[in-house]
Image (tube, rainbow, N blue to C red):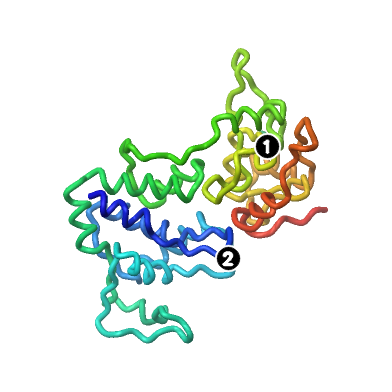
Amino acid sequence: MADIFQLFNAINVWKQGDQRAPHKPLLILYALGRWQRGLTDVTFLEAEPQLTELLQRFGPKRRSDHPEQPFWRLQKDKVWFVRTPAPLPLKTGDDIPKVGALRSPDVVAGFTQDVREALTSNRHLAAGIAASILAEHFPESYHEDLLDAVGLVLEPSPVQQRKRDPNFRHRVLKAYEYRCAVCGFDVRLGSVSIALDAAHIRWHQAGGPDTEINGLALCVLHHKVFDLGAFTVSDGVVLVSDQANGTTGFAESLMAYHGKMIRPPQHPDWMPEPKHLEWHGREVFKGDARHRG
Ligand SMILES: [Zn+2]
């Protein structure tokens, strides 16, 4: 069993510098969700629209999404197979088949026999693998939405979380004087701040450090929509995505701050590091910034 868990932990996630590459993690979560519902094999035809949606919702913005890449390349990690009726024509200059060829109803994929046996004999394994992938690749604010999107249920599982500096929260909230850097929210219950988080600008999962210059004090609403890419901060200015829209809530909670400076930390040395903000703008922020009139 430990061996199978190791295989998943060792999965080679394609990375170029610090770019996010959530393709394989999302395919595995998708397949684990299906497994929990008793579904084993899947055709590319069926998986393609669902993987595309997952990539658009939870991946970085890219010119195009390529669900065929994890669908084909996960085979190399020995946890996944793709069965084709005959050798498929390859994309020019690439080692993966043409997307059109993958769309044949006879192209079927799923977990390998070893993985299936392990998942069958240990009913906690699917949730354990999923929890480990979530912790490794996505901030906590994504977990519930992702689990809902792929229909996965996580039972409590003893997954080792990567160590974080327990003082990060305290240092960031102190730097911003216990107020949301966007809206100034600072509700207390007695003397205790509530619904206020220390958000990482560059995610912990992407190597973001636990320091003030990589943190923002944000209320739970602004933390969530920041992590999901509805707004970013550039040069200290809040920029709302052109993909974000709505009426109630949108105008007063987002657009009201578009183009405005964040509330700065109490010491200039703690201003967000431009490199980390740039990472957020590139890897998390969705779409482009709205027009600043
Ligand atoms: Zn706020």
Q: Is residue 13 visible?
A: yes
Q: Residues within 10 Å of mark 2 (few under 14, many from 20)?
A: few
- As helix, strand or loop, the secondary structure at mark 1 comes to helix
For the residue carrying disc 1, how many other residues have a C-alpha within 10 Å: few (<14), some (14-19), or many (20+)?
A: many
Please tell me which residue is depicted at 25% across the width and 43% down the height of the picture: 124
Specify which label sits upstream in the sequence, 2 or 1.
Answer: 2
Residue 203, relative to residue 179: is it above or below?
Answer: below
Q: CA distance from mark 2 to mark 1?
A: 29 Å
Q: Secondary structure at mark 2?
A: loop
The reply, left or right, for residue 216 in relation to residue 138 is: right
User: Residue at left 43%, top 47%?
Assistant: 134
**Residue 219: horizontal and vertical position, in percent?**
62, 33
Residue type at mark 1 is Glu
Query: Which residue extends farthest right?
Result: 293
Q: Residue at x 70, y 52 (%)?
A: 275
Please give the label number shown on residue 59: none
* Left or right, residue 56 beside residue 210: left
Q: Position of residue 151 (x, y in %)?
A: 35, 49
For ligand 1, which image quadrant applies? top right
Which residue bears the numbered disc 1?
A: 212
The label nearer to you, 2 versus 1, is 1
Q: Which residue is mark 2?
A: 62
Residue 194 in picture, x, y percent from top left = 59, 24
Q: Position of residue 175 (x, y in %)?
A: 71, 30
